[in-house]
Image (cartoon, rainbow, N blue to C red):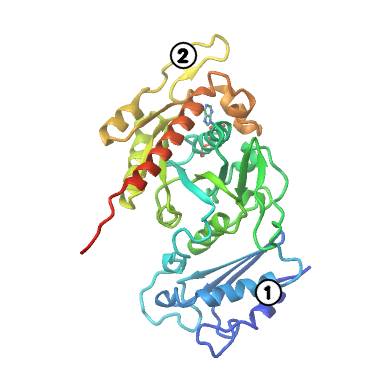
Amino acid sequence: MYNTDDIYAALKGVEGPDRVKSLVESGAVSGVNIRDGKVFVTIAVDPDRAAASEPMRLAAEAAIKAIPGVAVAMVALTSERGPEARGNGSGHGAQRPMPNAEPERGVGLENISKIVAVASGKGGVGKSTTAANLAIALARLGLRTGLLDADIFGPSLPRLFGIKEKPELSDDGRSLAPLEKFGVKLMSIGFLVEDDAAIVWRGPMVMSAITQLLREVAWGQLDVLVVDMPPGTGDVQLTMAQNASLAGAIIVSTPQDLALIDARRGIAMFQQVRVPILGLFENMSYFLCPHCGGRSDIFAHGGARAEADKFKVPFLGEAPLDIAIREGSDHGLPVMASAPESNQAKPYLALAEHVRDALAQGSREAGRKPKIVIG
Ligand code: ADP
């Protein structure tokens, strides 16, 4: 088995940023992390040279991948000052994500017709549960569907789908083959790291990891890829929204006012980067009693509908706070897979129908766009 020394030895053969010294001698390697066959490396470069440093990043990745036993290599450029450059007062903050270093929009995603993000202003509102049930429902509607867990801070896809296996390399030997369950192709950083392994993600590594999960996975031909976004509206979400050419975003919120304030931030973020908001979905909207089947509006139910009206975005429905939904998502059997005809599954099926129709509509409108002819 290889160790950190082997990684450094491999990187000695890669030209550093000044093209004179090797990457290792230049002191630009700012972090090496090995975990379960996966190697994560960060290289500090001048932010202005981010795009120009892309060949170096690729060369470093190739050198690490060539080490026997390395299954996955992720190399990210960071704007953290290298030891030599430190203290020169240029004012660039450490760990700033560098979108310039990202591949062009759409590269590596040619086989995916539409990418839809499921987002929320904060964690714990049921975003992942919604994304999982939506993906299964879309597959049941006959769409070739993938689900990418981009919530790398708290990947929940392995738990939601009850998956313990690890993905294999695909036939081309360069990308990972997604796992498949309930008719959906699945990928999550949670498949690659040990349970509960505390990964301290630094800004640029986050972007690099998400980009690789998106582009270096053999998704095959997909009609729709559902992306379970990290919660919140930070740089990561913004860059992801910009880089992945999203066809639309669904914002999940609970009815409480506080969650809705966060939902508003989510809407604003997607609008800022011109990603169409497919609508607002209210989760844990009302309580369904498991004993009598009765419904109680324990929160100020209907908040999301009012909010959707206010922002002139579609209201996509509401799922109850329900023990079957909770047990399903915590035991690897989402309600859409275990009881697709049940009352609990209905809101997700309706959501999927809405998403399918909105995407088809979007394609028709894109096709109808008037061409500007000059001359
Ligand atoms: P998020 O992705 O927003 O952090 P999760 O989907 O992981 O949220 O859900 C958080 C917790 O709430 C999980 O334990 C999940 O089972 C539970 N949960 C989600 N939606 C519902 C629901 N409609 N009814 C009951 N429990 C739910």
SS assignment at label 2: strand
Vertical side of 213 occupied by 79: above or below = below
Quadrant (top left/top right/bottom left/bottom right) for the C terminus: bottom left
Q: Give the residue number, with chain letter if any, for mark 2.
A: 295
Q: Is residue 196 left or right of residue 280?
A: right
Q: In this rendering, does residue 262 appear at all? A: yes
Disc 1 residue type (three-letter): Ile
Quadrant (top left/top right/bottom left/bottom right) for the N terminus: bottom right
Vertical side of 323 occupied by 289: above or below = above
The outermost residue toward the top is 292
Disc 2 residue type (three-letter): Arg
Vertical side of 303 occupied by 40: above or below = below
Q: Nearer the viewer, residue 20 or 145?
A: 145
Density class for disc 2 (Cα within 10 Å; few <14, some 14-19, many ≥20) is few
SS assignment at label 1: helix
Label 1 C-beta lies within 8 Å of the nearest ligand 1 atom: no
Identify which residue is drawn at 57% across, 73% down. 58
Give the alpha-carbon distance from disc 2 to disc 1, as whole Å.
58 Å
Q: Give the residue number, with chain letter if any, for mark 1.
A: 7
Dot label at residue 252: none
Q: Is residue 375 left or right of residue 171?
A: left
